[in-house]
Amino acid sequence: MPGSHPPQVQVHPGQRFTVLVAGNRNGTQVTRAFPVPKPTNSVLVITDVHGQTVRYQARTRGTVRLKVRSQYCPSNPKVSTCSVLAVSVR
């Protein structure tokens, strides 16, 4: 998650999209290496989480950021919150 500006995407109200969270492989098992990115407001909702795959749906027009709380966020070497994706719903 280097840099101060997260990637940006644009979707339409009602549209669904998927984010694949980086994972760690342990034999045949793969687990998420980072927490599930959570929306900062109700413009977007999480509809499903399965393994590394997180599904979202845009509810209404607006902007939202997906954030995680992780030790790898650049603002604090301990644990802090950072944006991993900026979503514009138009």
Image: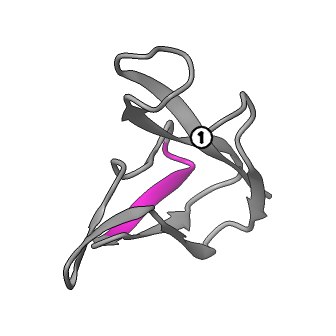
Question: Residue 12 colored magenta?
Answer: no
Q: Is residue 39 left or right of residue 31?
A: right
Q: Is residue 26 visible?
A: yes
> How many residues crowd mark 1 within 10 Å: few (<14), some (14–19), many (20+)?
few
Q: Is residue 3 above or below residue 90?
A: above
Q: Chief secondary structure of the magenta span?
A: strand
Residue 79, picture quadrant: top left
Q: Is residue 33 left or right of residue 13?
A: left
Foreground of the two, 26 or 42? 26
The picture places residue 8, in percent across and down from the top left corner, at 76, 51
The picture places residue 87, in percent across and down from the top left corner, at 69, 51
Residue in view at x 59 percent, y 40 percent: 1
Question: Residue 47 colored magenta?
Answer: yes
Pick the quarter of the image with the C terminus: bottom right
Q: Which residues are magenta?
A: 42-48
Q: Is residue 37 above or below residue 27?
A: above
Which amino acid type is shown beneath numbered disc 1?
Answer: Met
Q: Is residue 68 left or right of residue 85?
A: left
The picture places residue 85, in percent across and down from the top left corner, at 63, 48
Q: Is residue 2 above or below residue 79?
A: below
Q: Is residue 38 left or right of residue 10?
A: left
Foreground of the two, 13 or 47? 47
Residue 74, picture quadrant: top right
Dot 1 falls on a residue whose secondary structure is: loop
Foreground of the two, 13 or 10? 10
The picture places residue 77, in percent across and down from the top left corner, at 43, 16
Q: Which residue is mark 1?
A: 1
Residue in view at x 20 percent, y 85 percent: 28
Residue in view at x 72 percent, y 32 percent: 3
In this view, which residue lies farthest toward the bottom? 28
Q: Is residue 59 above or below residue 81?
A: below
